[in-house]
Amino acid sequence: SDGEAAVLVCDIDDIFGLVQRLPADELARVLSAVFDPLDDMAREHGAMRVLDECYTMVLGARTDDTESVRTNDKEEEGERAVSQVAAMMAMAERMVRHASTVKVTLGGAEQSIRVRVGVSSGAVHSAMVGIKTSAFSVFGPAVREAAMAAQRGVAGCV
């Protein structure tokens, strides 16, 4: 489906360094400690987690089995878009705070996990992808913009 949505992309700072330095069981603990509460936040706001290499969620995109909530009222559409972005920004700020409470010990020193978060809104294409194991996915300018904001962002900030 084509439409408008708010997109959030969250990435753990230095994830590749963590993968190289942590034993598998500790890495799994850290990832679960960071991302499980994010799934709860997504459900709380009616957002959907998207299969992607970074933690990605979308609010407002349609799946094939959802009815359209689009209207011809531009003012109503604008209000919905502002509300979706505000919800994503609130989740982004909560994600940054939450991630900093997850600790990992590297080289004998305890440190907090830091994430980079990008938020964008705009055009997306959403679809169920895969034949044997299908997953909801989104593509488009808003997804690229959110991913770029996360990649180029400062760890610990939105």
Image (cartoon, helix red, strand yellow):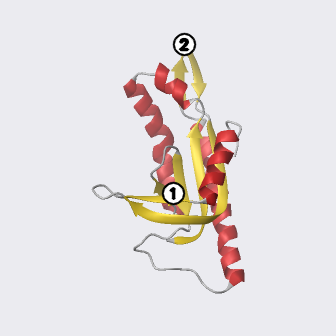
Q: Quadrant of residue 73?
A: bottom right
Q: Position of residue 23 (x, y in %)?
A: 41, 21
Bin the neighbour count of mark 1 within 10 Å (Cα to Cα): few under 14, some 14-19, many 20 and up. some
Q: Using the image, determine if residue 141 lies above or below residue 108.
A: below
Q: Position of residue 118 (x, y in %)?
A: 65, 49
Relative to the observer, which residue lies in front, 154 or 145? 145
- The answer to whether residue 93 is seen in the rendering is no
Bin the neighbour count of mark 2 within 10 Å (Cα to Cα): few under 14, some 14-19, many 20 and up. few
Relative to the observer, which residue lies in front, 139 or 5? 139
Q: Using the image, determine if residue 38 lies above or below residue 15.
A: below
Q: Earlier in the sequence, mark 2 or mark 1?
A: 1
- The answer to whether residue 117 is seen in the rendering is yes
Residue linked to disc 2:
108
Please, what is the three-letter code of the amino acid marked with disc 2?
Gly
Q: Quadrant of residue 140?
A: bottom right
> Image point 63% across, 59% down: which residue?
142
Is 148 on the left-hand or right-hand side of 43? right
How far, Cα to Cα, is label 2 from label 1? 34 Å
Residue linked to disc 1:
42
Q: Position of residue 83 (x, y in %)?
A: 66, 68
Q: Using the image, determine if residue 15 lies above or below residue 23.
A: below
Q: Quadrant of residue 25?
A: top left
> Image point 51% across, 57% down: which residue?
42
Residue lying furthest bottom? 72
Q: Position of residue 74 (x, y in %)?
A: 70, 82
> Image point 60% across, 33% down: which residue?
13
Is 123 on the left-hand or right-hand side of 29? right
Q: Secondary structure at mark 2?
A: loop
Please, what is the three-letter code of the amino acid marked with disc 1?
Ala
